[in-house]
Image: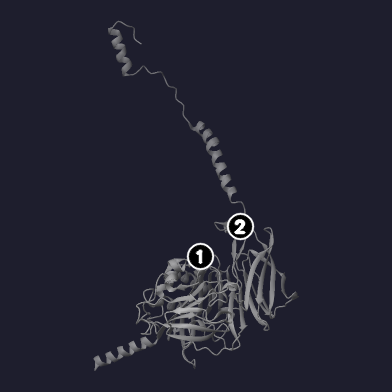
């Protein structure tokens, strides 16, 4: 009886372990209007466990390093993105998952955390070690607490903004040492499933690369009586296939990744590849996809109806004819790339002015919708060494002043915290809004300059958050049944969808001293000391001895002996 009881207990434990974790992997291939191709990887791990209680001891699919991090520091939500390059919204359309250039980290903490700033510092240092990034440089000089721009994406009991921390390192460089630990967090690593395509040599030979980690609590079922934890690992990469393909827009998995798909991850409950085959410019279908997809899926993404060819890697029919899957896309006829569809909302940002004393930051926000106006929340984070003049803030729309409905400004403190400016601005239909503010450049201490001060100082991207009007009415999204790329930002309003855009980072020059002058002074001083003082010191310390004439050596004495024998006078 005891043996039977142990067997039943082990079976129950194994059954519970298999149901507590669910893994879904997904690849979205999206042809861009200018001929490039965007590939979006998403790996979603849902874990039916309570990490906040700290009673979890067995980790199966969820990474133990991240699970212990969430439990130890009272994290409610964590969002980390490492990006190389800039997503051009005007050329590529609206991004599937937006991220600024560099490193971005924003975290919601539990209300039980006694010291949020201390937990934030410890958390950034631990993440720096996990992902081999420079997140340990996050401190009070680049950390802000937004009040309206970043709301919780998961289940939240409250939205006390004092529990939120946000920081950006625009100068962070992303390379293979950041990708390797990111891949190790996957349940199957890079050995099986869609992760076999993540070849670093190909991923970083691209126009845009962004990898992210999102951790949030979600409802376990429709009643939301229990909470599960969701981990999303996303990777977005844009390949310039038009240039690499010798002027052709045709592409395939092997051309982009130098590999093909052979099987799904054994631990995944769902593994699919989606290819966007929607007709462009309301014309007939111009794309031809091979091999034949297992199914076709239609969804409303970012306010527009989109058609996808679906390849289910768990379907036994897919690998009957061949051992590997190499999705190929060919254009039936060349598409006129001069007529690019303009996104509903896009923005630009630049620095103007002359000299190294004052300047002006300008942000242009465009609403191209023909008849719908909508509000947008603008977040500006400016370093303390650019001293903003808030009285010079102007917002002009169609030649008229546009007063913000809401405005929050936190002034900077030298060497302690940056400027924080948040505004709620109404964008009229078919309009361009220009936001300008002047600043003064500060003179830093000579020890505060980086090794390459003449390169300039980076200013993080502006953040635009808006509910953009949808062309087609949208329905409520079921997270468990819908594709992953449609469920990260759910919207309860069917007439609009949430969109977050990032502008370009700025590069600003500051008054820089001539760092070559100390070098010249050191060289001149060393020369004077060596030549003048060295010679004088040598004369003072040298000891002089009078040398008497010597009687000669052995050779001279032998010569004199020989001369005496010959009767010749000695020398």
| Foreground pick, 142 / 471 | 471
Asked whether, in this view, residue 483 is left or right of residue 491, the answer is left
Quadrant housing the C terminus: top left
Under tag 1, what secondary structure?
loop
Quarter of image, res 284:
bottom right
Alpha-carbon span between mark 1 and mark 2:
25 Å
In the image, residue 19 lies at what x, y percent? Answer: 38, 88
Which residue is rendered at x = 64% and y = 66% of the image?
Answer: 350
Name the side, left or right, on which 535 lies relative to 23: right
Horizontal side of 7 relative to 35 (left or right) equals left
Position of residue 111 in the picture relative to residue 59 (left or right): right
Q: In which quarter of the image is residue 71?
A: bottom left
Q: Name the residue under label 2.
A: 445
Locate the N terminus by quadrant: bottom left
The scheme the figure's colours follow is one colour
Numbered label attached to residue 6: none
Residue highlighted by disc 1: 173
Q: In which quarter of the image is residue 197?
A: bottom left
Q: In front: mark 1 or mark 2?
A: 1
- Which numbered disc, 1 or 2, marks the residue that appears first in the sequence? 1
> How many marks can you see?
2
Identify the element where label 2 is drawn.
Answer: loop
Q: Nearer the viewer, residue 411 or 380?
A: 380
Disc 1 crowd, CA 10 A, few/some/many (<14, 14-19, 20+) = some
User: Around disc 2, counting alpha carbons within 10 Å, would you say few (fewer than 14), some (14 to 19), or many (20 or more)?
Assistant: few
């Amino acid at each position: 009886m005891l043996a039977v009881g142990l067997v039943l207990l082990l079976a129950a434990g194994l059954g519970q372990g298999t149901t507590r974790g669910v893994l879904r992997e997904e690849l979205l291939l999206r042809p861009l209007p200018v001929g490039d191709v965007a590939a979006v990887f998403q790996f979603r791990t849902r874990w039916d466990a309570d990490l906040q209680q700290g009673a979890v001891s067995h980790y199966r699919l969820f990474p133990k390093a991240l699970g212990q991090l969430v439990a130890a520091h009272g994290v409610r939500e964590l969002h980390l993105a490492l990006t190389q390059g800039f997503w051009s919204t005007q050329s590529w359309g609206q991004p599937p998952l937006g991220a600024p250039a560099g490193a971005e980290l924003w975290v919601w903490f539990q209300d039980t955390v006694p010291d949020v700033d201390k937990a934030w510092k410890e958390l950034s240092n631990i993440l720096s070690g996990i992902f081999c990034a420079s997140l340990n440089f996050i401190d009070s000089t680049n950390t802000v607490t937004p009040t309206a721009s970043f709301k919780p994406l998961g289940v939240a009991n409250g939205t006390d903004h004092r529990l939120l921390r946000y920081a950006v390192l625009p100068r962070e460089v992303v390379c293979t040492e950041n990708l390797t630990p990111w891949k190790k967090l996957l349940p199957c690593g890079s050995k099986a499933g869609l992760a076999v395509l993540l070849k670093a040599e190909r991923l970083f030979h691209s126009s845009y690369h962004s990898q992210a980690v999102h951790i949030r609590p979600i409802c376990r079922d429709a009643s939301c009586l229990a909470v599960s934890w969701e981990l999303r690992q996303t990777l977005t990469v844009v390949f310039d296939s038009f240039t690499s393909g010798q002027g052709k827009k045709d592409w395939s998995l092997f051309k982009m990744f130098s590999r093909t798909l052979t099987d799904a991850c054994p631990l995944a409950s769902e593994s699919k590849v989606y290819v966007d085959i929607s007709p462009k410019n309301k014309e007939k279908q111009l794309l031809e996809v091979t091999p034949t997809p297992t199914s076709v899926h239609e969804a409303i993404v970012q306010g527009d109806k989109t058609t996808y060819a679906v390849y289910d890697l768990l379907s036994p029919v897919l690998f009957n004819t061949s051992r590997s899957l190499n999705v190929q896309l060919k254009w039936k006829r060349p598409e006129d790339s001069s007529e690019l569809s303009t996104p509903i909302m896009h923005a630009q940002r630049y620095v103007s002015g002359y000299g190294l004393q004052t300047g002006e930051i300008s942000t242009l926000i465009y609403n191209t919708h023909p008849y719908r106006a909508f509000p947008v929340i603008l977040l500006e984070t400016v370093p303390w060494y650019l001293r903003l003049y808030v009285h010079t803030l102007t917002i002009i729309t169609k030649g008229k002043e546009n007063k913000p409905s809401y405005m929050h400004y936190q002034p900077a403190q030298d060497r302690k915290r940056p400027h924080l400016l948040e505004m709620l601005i109404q964008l009229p239909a078919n309009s361009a809004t220009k936001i300008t503010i002047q600043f003064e450049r500060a003179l830093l201490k000579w020890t505060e300059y980086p090794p390459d001060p003449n390169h300039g100082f980076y200013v993080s991207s502006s953040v635009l958050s808006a509910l953009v009007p949808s062309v087609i009415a949208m329905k409520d999204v079921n997270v468990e049944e819908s594709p992953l790329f449609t469920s990260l930002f759910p919207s309860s309003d069917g007439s609009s969808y949430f969109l977050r855009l990032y502008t370009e980072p700025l590069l600003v020059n500051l008054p820089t001293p001539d760092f070559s002058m100390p070098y010249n002074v050191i060289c001149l001083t060393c020369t004077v000391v060596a030549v003048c003082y060295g010679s004088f010191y040598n004369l003072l310390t040298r000891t002089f001895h009078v040398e008497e004439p010597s009687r000669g050596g052995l050779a001279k004495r032998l010569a004199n002996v020989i001369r005496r024998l010959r009767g010749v006078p000695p020398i």
